[in-house]
Image: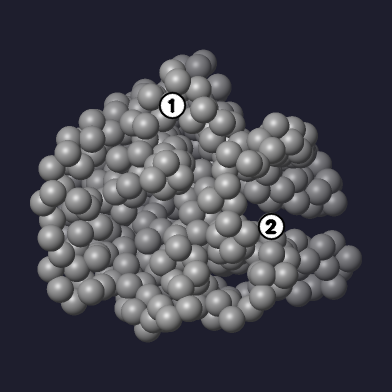
Amino acid sequence: MKRIQEIDALRGFALFGIILTHMYQGYLASSVPAEYFGYNLMYPIDNVSRWIVRNLFSGKFYAIFSMLFGLSFYLILDRKQNSSPLKFAWRLVLLFVIGYMNHVFYRGDFLVVYAIFGFVLLLARPLPSKYILPIGLFLALNGPNIIIQGLNLLEFPLQLNWYIPMGPSPAQANNTYFDLILHGDLKSVMVSNGTIGIINKFNYLVHSGRFWVVPGLFLLGLWIGRQKYHERLDQLKWGNIILISASIGIPMVFIHFHFYTADHSPFVRFIAFIAQELSNIFMPLLYIGLIFPFFNWNFTQKLLKFLVPVGRMGLSTYVIQSLFGIIIFYGYGLGLFLKISATLAILLGVAVFAIQTIFSVWWFKRFKYGPLEWLWRSGTNLKWQAMKK
């Protein structure tokens, strides 16, 4: 039970970082038009908040959440010889439905992405672990995009041109979506997200490299499960994990921060790009290495146990975070997008997460599953599950 609690706590920790990142962004799922650059930098401290979120949060906490999804696949299906792949596929279909419903309100939803790339885990299930690790690392490090950019530096043009040409240019689409977030009504936002928003999501996945990174992280989570690291957490050499991940991750953060600017040559920017991808793997490992040993200390153990319930209902927590975000920032809600600073937005994220933590503790004193977890489980089993304890 303790080991499961630790995994749930880590999921809760990842959700904490995710909501702070999204709150900083104002739950905007696109680039900011040029005239609005720095829209949330209202006070000097906001520059500190921006640096922290961009370098220590963005891309880091979703990596933890994604690896845990791959680990969950192992726990649900991969370790059981007689388990049904079809049932897991049906589970992914249901996740897509839940994710699409969330996407209609919030275009940045990643449950839809998880549902689609979850099928990669089914395809990888027959592969031996010795292949899972290198493939997972190559994809998680955005290997295909690194190769393509490297070839472009050698003037061997190979463009990853999978964009779906539809409607206006990407810049025009971003401006239209930005205006919709500021001034659009609920129906207009839902229609846009449910139609052109899907195309924009696919194009973002390709452009950002998450088309490769997400399935790569899933495979790394699967590999971790096969190595049964989650069953022998007390035996792992956390000091070495922290030292190695910090020695690589922290320098990579600063290399990307200082050199991925227009002031440097394409080659230097390419090196900084690789540094960013490395930091997005080793910084999450550092965070994991820092949080797990705290379970052995009496004081921090009590604090971390508050993360267990909120991580246990990870699906519900994530969707509810999205609802909070769009109500706070979007024009048809409180409309605070251009009215509050980055630091205040982050503090609001802390408050929302605190509310979710209190709610989840209250909820699990009465019920067996989180609200959406119960619905997901019932749909998977095609039978209403007992809810109350």
Q: In what quadrant of the picture does the N terminus appear? A: top left
Residue drawn at (65%, 48%) of the image:
281
| Amino acid type, callout 1 | Gln
Identify the secondary structure beneath mark 1. Answer: helix
Distance from Cα at disc 1 to Cα at disc 2: 32 Å
In the rendering, at what x and y percent does residue 148 appear?
75, 68
Report if residue 156 is visible in the image.
yes
Identify the secondary structure beneath mark 2. Answer: loop
Q: Residue furthest top?
A: 44
Report which residue position mark 2 lands on. Answer: 141
Residue drawn at (86%, 68%) of the image:
155
In the rendering, at what x and y percent does residue 32 appear?
47, 45
In the rendering, at what x and y percent does residue 187 appear?
17, 59
Q: How is the image coloured?
A: one colour
Residue drawn at (45%, 20%) of the image:
298
Foreground residue, 271 or 163? Answer: 271
Report if residue 318 is visible in the image.
no
Q: Nearer the viewer, mark 1 or mark 2?
A: 1
Residue 53 in the image: above or below residue 45: below
Mark 2: few/some/many CA within 10 Å (<14, 14-19, 20+): many
Residue 153 located left or right of residue 242: right
Foreground residue, 219 or 384? Answer: 384
Tags 1 and 2 touching, CB below 8 Å: no
Mark 1: few/some/many CA within 10 Å (<14, 14-19, 20+): some
Sequence-wise first label, 1 or 2: 2
Residue drawn at (33%, 47%) of the image:
312
| Amino acid type, callout 2 | Leu
Marker disc for residue 301: 1
Residue 348 located left or right of residue 68: left
Residue 215 located left or right of residue 135: left
